[in-house]
Image (cartoon, rainbow, N blue to C red):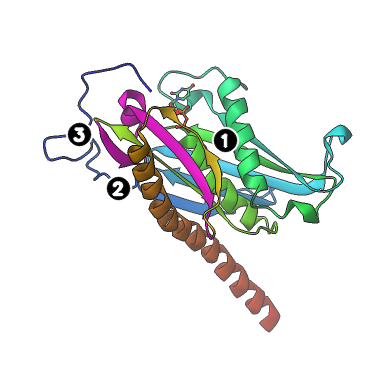
Amino acid sequence: MGTPSDKKLINENGLRLDGRGDEELRPIKISTDILERADGSAFMEWGGNKILVAVYGPREAYPKHTQDIEKSVVKARYNMAAFSVDERKRPGPDRRSTEISKVISEALSAAVMVEQFPRTQIDVFIEVIQADAGTRIASLTAASVALASAGIPMRDMVVGCSAGKVEDRIVLDLSKDEDNFGQADLPMAVLSKNKQVVLIQMDGDLSKEEFARATDMIMKATDRIAEIQRKALSEKYKIENLSESQNGGE
Ligand code: UDP
């Protein structure tokens, strides 16, 4: 959370700086199959975030000591481009990206049927090319679509969203200013059908009641976001089925 500031985050009409109500999401768009060489890929725009995900695998895990004889290892690598933020980010891995890569890898492992592919790895390369708060849950949500578009067996999709506290109000999907100058940020991700929590982190403080309200808002929002994921994938599979039936008819 940023330093205390007199920046107003809620206007006189009770709306947020970008005109949203408390429970409103920023616009979200997802498309699949962006990259020819990847086994699966997705491009996500979530508010001002622009994120590209490429999936490769399952393929033999390398180096060999990283192999698990019982399951595939999901290796997500989150990277923020130097030009993705206002103040140039120093290129290369840092503590933040290492942490985000780890929590995303763990969350995705809960969804992928890793036990079907022992000794392999599934690489998930995440490139944030424009960052505008909430990149970890946007990346995770997009990565889940990219894995599905690669045809990797999954028990469920992972879907994420954040909520937080701004001027003592609990609001959904923090913008950059709200993240910087707000009081708390709670990114969370669940498996979309059974709502098992696969990622939860918190920056700032929330009371028990505020926490319950924030998680409740997130849970409701994940249904809406899961629908956008489904649409992105159904576009892909509709088109593929069409071309298959056309080929079959020739
Ligand atoms: N950010 C930045 N420079 C950095 C890291 C982050 O400007 O080196 C910005 C970026 O817009 C990011 C936001 O701060 O989305 C919030 O970062 P946080 O660590 O909370 O992760 P996120 O909300 O993106 O998951």
Binning the other alpha carbons within 10 Å of mark 1 as few (below 14), some (14 to 19) or many (20 upward) gives some
Is residue 118 positioned above or below 200 on the image? below
Q: Position of residue 69 (x, y in %)?
A: 87, 45
Distance, label 1 to label 3, CA atoms, is 32 Å
Q: Position of residue 171 (x, y in %)?
A: 30, 40
Type of amino acid under label 1: Glu
Q: Is residue 218 left or right of residue 13?
A: right
Helix, strand or loop at label 3? It is loop
Q: Which residue is the site of mark 1?
A: 127
Residue 161 drawn in magenta:
no
- Among numbered discs 1 and 2, the one appearing first in the sequence: 2
Quadrant where the image shows the N terminus: top left
Is residue 229 positioned above or below 49 on the image? below
Distance, label 3 to label 2, CA atoms, is 13 Å
Type of amino acid under label 2: Glu
| Residue stretch rendered in magenta on the structure | 168-193
Binning the other alpha carbons within 10 Å of mark 2 as few (below 14), some (14 to 19) or many (20 upward) gives some
Whether residue 51 is visible? no
Residue toward you, 69 or 149:
69
Q: Position of residue 228 (x, y in %)?
A: 45, 57
Q: Which residue is the site of mark 2?
A: 23
